Amino acid sequence: MIFDVIKVLAGKVKVCATSAEGDSYFISSIDGIDGDEVTFTDAVDGIEVKLDRSMVDQCGLTTYGEATVPTVVEIGRIQSNESTFFEDNSKDHAISNKKFDSVAATCKEYIQAFTSKDAQLIKNCVIEGRNRDLEKLKILGADRVLVFNKISVPDGVYVRQLYWSLIDKKLIQALQEIDESIDGIDDEEFKVDAEIIKEDLRKNVADYRYHMKGVEFEKLFNQWPTLLNPSPFNLNGS
């Protein structure tokens, strides 16, 4: 049935299809249909895709508005030009298509931030609403996309290393800012206070490292050294 849905929606309602193997496709239009094979160009990565009916019918379908997927009966009416499905639901379809374009644009932004090799993982993350994981990886400076809820032990170690490197970087920046603030100031008491603050920062980070040993991976991004706040991972409460 999914094959027939995509066929009748072609050029009218944009859809995301996710295969049984977990591959996601952004379908804004169809280049051609040859019997039981559909050809389209993915709206995100620009790759031409050919899928047969059996593969398409096992896909999950995502749209972004109400009244976007016709019933089996409605499909038959559309195919026989007896339906006003698209006319009746044009506003919903416009809303859905606009959201689709926004989601596709978000995918493209993340592909630019990482690499085209990660396009499939990025599309899956965005469709599933896991943008925050991608944002965290960007903040960490990761060189590839990782799926947090399926992360391997070696990849988990890699992320932790990036996490601690980021903390060290933020600490160095904070210390440098203090040094710059006292540079050229002829006030010994102020300089003494500044050194105390610097030592407090170092101790705060050292204590944090000690208490964070063995913390569960999923809790890692909810924690941050107090004196280095705000946390760069405070993504609208994430």
Image (spheres, helix red, strand yellow):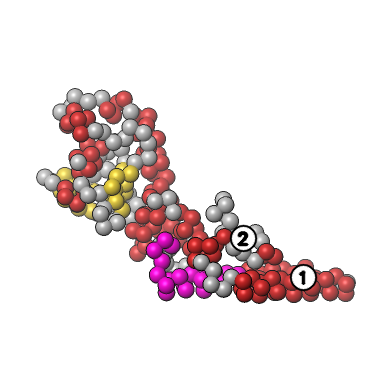
Q: 10 Å neighbourhood of mark 1: few (<14), some, or many (≥20)?
A: some
Q: Position of residue 183 (x, y in %)?
A: 79, 72
Height in image: 122 above or below 154?
A: above
Residue type marked 1: Ile
Task: Quadrant for the N terminus, please.
Answer: top left
Height in image: 19 above or below 228?
A: above
Identify the element where label 2 is drawn: loop
Q: State the extent of the magenta-drawn residues as a range.
A: 148-168
Q: Position of residue 118 (x, y in %)?
A: 37, 62
Residue at x 52%, y 73% (from the top left corner): 161
Going by the image, does 179 lie left or right of 126? Answer: right
The residue nearer to you, when weighing 93 against 218, is 218
Residue type marked 2: Ser
Q: How many marks?
A: 2
Residue 28 shown in magenta: no
Residue 166 shown in magenta: yes
The residue nearer to you, when weighing 129 against 123, is 129
Dominant SS in magenta: helix
Tell me the number on the disc at residue 231. 2
Q: Position of residue 125 (x, y in %)?
A: 40, 55
Task: Quadrant for the C terminus, please.
Answer: bottom right
Q: Position of residue 65 (x, y in %)?
A: 37, 36
Q: 10 Å neighbourhood of mark 2: few (<14), some, or many (≥20)?
A: some
Residue where numbered disc 1 is placed: 197
Residue 39 visible in rendering = no
Residue 73 visible in rendering = yes
Q: How far apart in space, not on screen, are marks 1 and 2 (Cα)?
A: 19 Å
Identify the element where label 1 is drawn: helix
